[in-house]
Image (cartoon, rainbow, N blue to C red):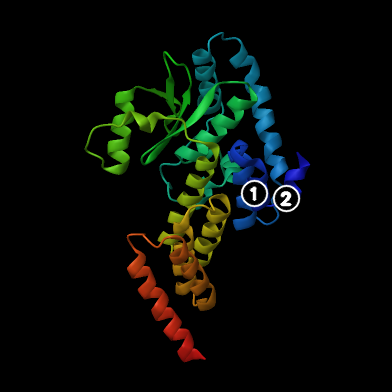
Amino acid sequence: MRDLDRTTFKTEVQAAGQKLSPARAGLLFARELAYPDLRPSDYLVQLDDLAAAAHPSVETHRTARDRGLALAEFLFQRLNFSGNRLDYYNPLNSYLNEVLDRRLGIPISLSVIYLEVGWRLGLPVVGVGLPGHFIVSVTDPSDPLYLDPFQGGVVLTVEDCARLVQEASGHRGRFDPHWLAPTAPREIAARMLNNLRGFYAQKEDWLLVMAVLEHLYALQPEVSAHLRDLGLVHYRNDSFQRALQFLDQYLSREPDAPDFDSVRQSRDLLFEHLMRLN
Protein backbone atom coordinates (compact mmCIF):
# COMPACT_ATOMS: atom_id res chain seq x y z
CA MET A 1 0.00 0.00 0.00
CA ARG A 2 2.87 2.37 0.81
CA ASP A 3 4.07 1.99 -2.79
CA LEU A 4 1.32 4.44 -3.73
CA ASP A 5 3.14 7.19 -1.83
CA ARG A 6 6.16 6.72 -4.08
CA THR A 7 4.45 6.65 -7.45
CA THR A 8 2.90 9.22 -9.77
CA PHE A 9 -0.52 9.52 -11.33
CA LYS A 10 0.89 8.88 -14.80
CA THR A 11 2.78 5.78 -13.69
CA GLU A 12 -0.26 4.45 -11.83
CA VAL A 13 -2.70 4.81 -14.72
CA GLN A 14 -0.25 3.28 -17.18
CA ALA A 15 0.53 0.31 -14.93
CA ALA A 16 -3.07 -0.35 -13.83
CA GLY A 17 -4.66 -0.34 -17.27
CA GLN A 18 -8.34 -1.21 -17.11
CA LYS A 19 -7.93 -2.33 -13.48
CA LEU A 20 -7.36 1.22 -12.31
CA SER A 21 -8.72 2.02 -8.87
CA PRO A 22 -10.61 5.33 -8.92
CA ALA A 23 -9.54 5.92 -5.31
CA ARG A 24 -5.86 5.38 -6.01
CA ALA A 25 -6.06 7.59 -9.10
CA GLY A 26 -8.06 10.25 -7.27
CA LEU A 27 -5.68 10.40 -4.33
CA LEU A 28 -2.68 10.70 -6.62
CA PHE A 29 -4.11 13.54 -8.65
CA ALA A 30 -5.18 15.22 -5.39
CA ARG A 31 -1.56 15.18 -4.23
CA GLU A 32 -0.22 16.42 -7.57
CA LEU A 33 -2.82 19.15 -8.09
CA ALA A 34 -3.49 20.52 -4.63
CA TYR A 35 -2.00 18.62 -1.67
CA PRO A 36 1.76 18.11 -2.13
CA ASP A 37 2.20 16.70 1.40
CA LEU A 38 -0.62 14.18 1.04
CA ARG A 39 0.17 10.53 1.76
CA PRO A 40 -2.36 8.61 -0.38
CA SER A 41 -1.77 5.41 1.58
CA ASP A 42 -3.27 7.01 4.70
CA TYR A 43 -6.59 7.31 2.88
CA LEU A 44 -6.47 3.79 1.51
CA VAL A 45 -6.20 2.71 5.14
CA GLN A 46 -9.31 4.79 5.88
CA LEU A 47 -11.19 2.96 3.12
CA ASP A 48 -10.03 -0.37 4.54
CA ASP A 49 -11.20 0.72 7.98
CA LEU A 50 -14.60 1.74 6.61
CA ALA A 51 -14.98 -1.68 5.01
CA ALA A 52 -14.01 -3.41 8.24
CA ALA A 53 -16.50 -1.31 10.21
CA ALA A 54 -19.29 -1.94 7.68
CA HIS A 55 -18.64 -5.67 7.47
CA PRO A 56 -20.80 -6.78 10.44
CA SER A 57 -23.83 -4.83 9.18
CA VAL A 58 -23.42 -5.93 5.57
CA GLU A 59 -22.65 -9.60 6.11
CA THR A 60 -25.83 -10.27 8.06
CA HIS A 61 -27.70 -10.09 4.73
CA ARG A 62 -27.78 -12.86 2.14
CA THR A 63 -28.65 -11.18 -1.15
CA ALA A 64 -26.47 -8.71 -3.01
CA ARG A 65 -29.37 -6.27 -3.06
CA ASP A 66 -29.80 -6.30 0.72
CA ARG A 67 -26.05 -6.09 1.29
CA GLY A 68 -25.86 -3.10 -1.03
CA LEU A 69 -28.68 -1.42 0.89
CA ALA A 70 -26.96 -2.17 4.18
CA LEU A 71 -23.74 -0.54 2.95
CA ALA A 72 -25.68 2.54 1.85
CA GLU A 73 -27.34 2.76 5.26
CA PHE A 74 -23.96 2.45 6.98
CA LEU A 75 -22.20 5.12 4.92
CA PHE A 76 -24.96 7.65 4.38
CA GLN A 77 -27.13 7.29 7.47
CA ARG A 78 -24.83 6.10 10.25
CA LEU A 79 -21.63 7.87 9.14
CA ASN A 80 -23.42 10.80 7.49
CA PHE A 81 -21.51 10.97 4.23
CA SER A 82 -23.67 13.45 2.34
CA GLY A 83 -24.02 15.64 -0.69
CA ASN A 84 -22.69 19.17 -0.35
CA ARG A 85 -25.72 21.05 -1.61
CA LEU A 86 -24.73 24.39 -0.05
CA ASP A 87 -21.31 24.54 -1.72
CA TYR A 88 -21.65 22.12 -4.63
CA TYR A 89 -19.04 23.75 -6.87
CA ASN A 90 -16.29 23.81 -4.29
CA PRO A 91 -13.32 21.83 -5.70
CA LEU A 92 -12.85 20.22 -2.26
CA ASN A 93 -15.86 18.04 -3.11
CA SER A 94 -13.83 16.35 -5.85
CA TYR A 95 -10.74 15.48 -3.81
CA LEU A 96 -11.20 12.12 -2.08
CA ASN A 97 -9.00 13.04 0.88
CA GLU A 98 -11.31 15.98 1.58
CA VAL A 99 -14.43 13.90 1.03
CA LEU A 100 -13.21 11.32 3.53
CA ASP A 101 -12.18 13.97 6.06
CA ARG A 102 -15.27 16.18 5.72
CA ARG A 103 -17.80 13.47 4.74
CA LEU A 104 -19.09 15.87 2.10
CA GLY A 105 -18.95 15.45 -1.65
CA ILE A 106 -20.66 15.53 -5.00
CA PRO A 107 -22.35 12.56 -6.70
CA ILE A 108 -19.23 11.04 -8.23
CA SER A 109 -16.90 11.40 -5.25
CA LEU A 110 -19.50 9.94 -2.87
CA SER A 111 -20.11 7.16 -5.39
CA VAL A 112 -16.38 6.36 -5.44
CA ILE A 113 -16.39 6.01 -1.64
CA TYR A 114 -19.35 3.62 -1.88
CA LEU A 115 -17.74 1.63 -4.70
CA GLU A 116 -14.34 1.31 -3.07
CA VAL A 117 -15.83 0.14 0.23
CA GLY A 118 -18.23 -2.17 -1.61
CA TRP A 119 -15.44 -3.77 -3.62
CA ARG A 120 -13.48 -4.38 -0.43
CA LEU A 121 -16.53 -6.24 0.89
CA GLY A 122 -16.91 -8.28 -2.29
CA LEU A 123 -20.13 -6.59 -3.40
CA PRO A 124 -21.03 -6.58 -7.12
CA VAL A 125 -21.24 -2.80 -7.37
CA VAL A 126 -20.54 -0.52 -10.33
CA GLY A 127 -20.65 3.17 -11.08
CA VAL A 128 -23.29 4.52 -13.44
CA GLY A 129 -22.48 7.76 -15.22
CA LEU A 130 -25.84 9.26 -16.06
CA PRO A 131 -25.69 12.50 -18.06
CA GLY A 132 -25.19 15.20 -15.44
CA HIS A 133 -25.41 12.90 -12.40
CA PHE A 134 -23.46 9.92 -11.09
CA ILE A 135 -25.01 7.01 -9.20
CA VAL A 136 -24.13 3.44 -8.26
CA SER A 137 -25.71 0.10 -9.00
CA VAL A 138 -25.70 -3.27 -7.30
CA THR A 139 -25.64 -5.54 -10.30
CA ASP A 140 -28.21 -8.28 -10.70
CA PRO A 141 -29.23 -9.43 -14.20
CA SER A 142 -32.85 -9.77 -13.18
CA ASP A 143 -33.23 -6.95 -10.66
CA PRO A 144 -30.47 -4.28 -10.61
CA LEU A 145 -30.51 -1.90 -7.69
CA TYR A 146 -29.77 1.78 -8.33
CA LEU A 147 -28.72 4.05 -5.47
CA ASP A 148 -28.00 7.78 -5.31
CA PRO A 149 -25.14 8.49 -2.86
CA PHE A 150 -25.69 12.24 -3.21
CA GLN A 151 -29.20 11.84 -1.83
CA GLY A 152 -28.24 9.69 1.13
CA GLY A 153 -28.18 6.40 -0.76
CA VAL A 154 -31.84 6.56 -1.72
CA VAL A 155 -33.13 3.77 -4.00
CA LEU A 156 -33.86 4.90 -7.56
CA THR A 157 -36.22 3.46 -10.14
CA VAL A 158 -35.47 3.83 -13.85
CA GLU A 159 -38.08 6.59 -13.88
CA ASP A 160 -36.18 8.34 -11.09
CA CYS A 161 -33.00 8.07 -13.16
CA ALA A 162 -34.77 9.66 -16.12
CA ARG A 163 -35.91 12.52 -13.88
CA LEU A 164 -32.37 13.03 -12.58
CA VAL A 165 -31.05 13.27 -16.14
CA GLN A 166 -33.73 15.79 -17.02
CA GLU A 167 -33.02 17.90 -13.95
CA ALA A 168 -29.24 17.76 -14.24
CA SER A 169 -28.76 18.12 -17.98
CA GLY A 170 -31.99 19.63 -19.28
CA HIS A 171 -32.56 16.60 -21.53
CA ARG A 172 -36.18 16.47 -22.63
CA GLY A 173 -36.05 13.49 -24.98
CA ARG A 174 -36.48 9.81 -24.27
CA PHE A 175 -34.34 8.18 -21.63
CA ASP A 176 -31.62 6.03 -23.20
CA PRO A 177 -31.28 2.71 -21.31
CA HIS A 178 -27.60 2.61 -22.31
CA TRP A 179 -27.05 5.42 -19.79
CA LEU A 180 -27.49 2.77 -17.08
CA ALA A 181 -24.50 0.76 -18.32
CA PRO A 182 -21.55 0.43 -15.92
CA THR A 183 -18.94 3.14 -16.15
CA ALA A 184 -15.38 1.81 -16.39
CA PRO A 185 -12.99 2.83 -13.60
CA ARG A 186 -10.81 4.86 -15.98
CA GLU A 187 -13.88 6.78 -17.10
CA ILE A 188 -14.79 7.44 -13.48
CA ALA A 189 -11.36 8.96 -12.91
CA ALA A 190 -11.72 11.03 -16.09
CA ARG A 191 -15.11 12.31 -14.99
CA MET A 192 -13.68 13.35 -11.63
CA LEU A 193 -10.94 15.28 -13.41
CA ASN A 194 -13.40 16.86 -15.82
CA ASN A 195 -15.40 18.14 -12.86
CA LEU A 196 -12.27 19.79 -11.48
CA ARG A 197 -11.51 21.22 -14.88
CA GLY A 198 -14.95 22.81 -14.98
CA PHE A 199 -14.66 24.19 -11.46
CA TYR A 200 -11.26 25.78 -12.10
CA ALA A 201 -12.35 27.13 -15.48
CA GLN A 202 -15.25 28.89 -13.74
CA LYS A 203 -12.72 30.54 -11.44
CA GLU A 204 -10.49 31.29 -14.45
CA ASP A 205 -7.60 29.57 -12.69
CA TRP A 206 -5.94 28.60 -15.94
CA LEU A 207 -2.79 27.17 -14.39
CA LEU A 208 -4.90 24.61 -12.53
CA VAL A 209 -7.02 23.98 -15.64
CA MET A 210 -3.75 23.24 -17.45
CA ALA A 211 -2.61 20.88 -14.70
CA VAL A 212 -5.95 19.02 -14.77
CA LEU A 213 -5.75 18.71 -18.57
CA GLU A 214 -2.26 17.23 -18.28
CA HIS A 215 -3.64 14.56 -15.97
CA LEU A 216 -6.55 13.91 -18.32
CA TYR A 217 -4.14 13.45 -21.19
CA ALA A 218 -2.01 11.06 -19.12
CA LEU A 219 -5.18 9.08 -18.40
CA GLN A 220 -6.60 9.28 -21.94
CA PRO A 221 -3.69 9.72 -24.38
CA GLU A 222 -5.97 8.55 -27.17
CA VAL A 223 -8.30 11.55 -26.74
CA SER A 224 -7.00 14.15 -29.19
CA ALA A 225 -9.25 16.87 -27.79
CA HIS A 226 -6.98 17.04 -24.76
CA LEU A 227 -4.13 18.12 -27.05
CA ARG A 228 -6.27 20.87 -28.54
CA ASP A 229 -7.41 22.07 -25.14
CA LEU A 230 -3.89 22.02 -23.73
CA GLY A 231 -2.78 24.12 -26.67
CA LEU A 232 -5.54 26.67 -26.14
CA VAL A 233 -4.92 26.93 -22.39
CA HIS A 234 -1.17 27.31 -22.90
CA TYR A 235 -1.97 30.05 -25.42
CA ARG A 236 -4.15 31.78 -22.83
CA ASN A 237 -1.26 31.60 -20.37
CA ASP A 238 1.22 33.06 -22.87
CA SER A 239 3.13 29.79 -23.11
CA PHE A 240 3.26 30.12 -26.88
CA GLN A 241 5.83 27.48 -27.80
CA ARG A 242 4.02 24.80 -25.83
CA ALA A 243 0.70 25.94 -27.26
CA LEU A 244 2.06 25.60 -30.78
CA GLN A 245 3.35 22.09 -30.07
CA PHE A 246 0.02 20.87 -28.74
CA LEU A 247 -2.02 22.44 -31.55
CA ASP A 248 0.33 20.94 -34.15
CA GLN A 249 -0.10 17.52 -32.57
CA TYR A 250 -3.87 17.88 -32.60
CA LEU A 251 -3.97 18.91 -36.26
CA SER A 252 -1.66 16.04 -37.23
CA ARG A 253 -3.87 13.54 -35.43
CA GLU A 254 -7.26 14.87 -36.50
CA PRO A 255 -7.16 16.06 -40.12
CA ASP A 256 -10.89 15.39 -40.47
CA ALA A 257 -11.97 17.05 -37.20
CA PRO A 258 -14.96 19.41 -37.52
CA ASP A 259 -12.93 22.16 -35.89
CA PHE A 260 -9.78 21.53 -37.94
CA ASP A 261 -9.99 24.84 -39.84
CA SER A 262 -10.62 26.97 -36.76
CA VAL A 263 -7.81 25.28 -34.81
CA ARG A 264 -5.47 25.63 -37.76
CA GLN A 265 -6.32 29.33 -37.97
CA SER A 266 -5.48 29.74 -34.28
CA ARG A 267 -2.24 27.81 -34.80
CA ASP A 268 -1.30 30.00 -37.78
CA LEU A 269 -2.01 33.21 -35.86
CA LEU A 270 0.08 31.92 -32.99
CA PHE A 271 2.92 31.05 -35.34
CA GLU A 272 2.83 34.54 -36.86
CA HIS A 273 2.88 36.04 -33.37
CA LEU A 274 5.96 34.00 -32.46
CA MET A 275 7.71 35.09 -35.64
CA ARG A 276 7.11 38.73 -34.75
CA LEU A 277 8.54 38.14 -31.29
CA ASN A 278 11.72 36.76 -32.83
Q: Secondary structure at mark 1?
A: helix
Left or right, 263 with respect to 249, comes to left
Per the image, the residue denoted by label 2 is 7
Per the image, the residue denoted by label 1 is 28
Kind of residue indicated by mark 1: Leu
Tell me whether the residue at label 2 lies in contact with that at label 1, contact meaning CB atoms closer than 8 angstroms.
Answer: yes
What residue is drawn where x is 46% and y is 61%? 253
> What crowding class fits label 1: few (fewer than 14 Cα within 10 Å), some (14-19), or many (20 or more)?
many
Quadrant of residue 49 within the rendered picture: top right
Q: Secondary structure at mark 2?
A: loop
Residue 100 seen in the current view: no
In x, y percent, where is residue 243?
49, 72
Question: For residue 262, which numbered disc appears in the image?
Answer: none
Left or right, 109 with respect to 43, comes to left
Specify which label sits upstream in the sequence, 2 or 1: 2
What residue is drawn where x is 47% and y is 88%? 275
What residue is drawn where x is 40% and y is 60%? 202
Question: Closer to the camera, 249 or 149?
Answer: 249
Up the image or down, 242 lies above or below 14; here it is below
Front disc: 2 or 1: 2
In x, y percent, where is residue 195?
46, 50
In x, y percent, where is residue 183?
47, 35
Residue 162 seen in the current view: yes
Quadrant of residue 20 within the rendered picture: top right
What residue is drawn where x is 56% and y is 28%? 79
Q: CA distance from mark 2 to mark 1?
A: 8 Å
Up the image or down, 224 lies above or below 113; here it is below
In x, y percent, where is residue 273?
44, 85
Left or right, 34 with respect to 240, comes to right
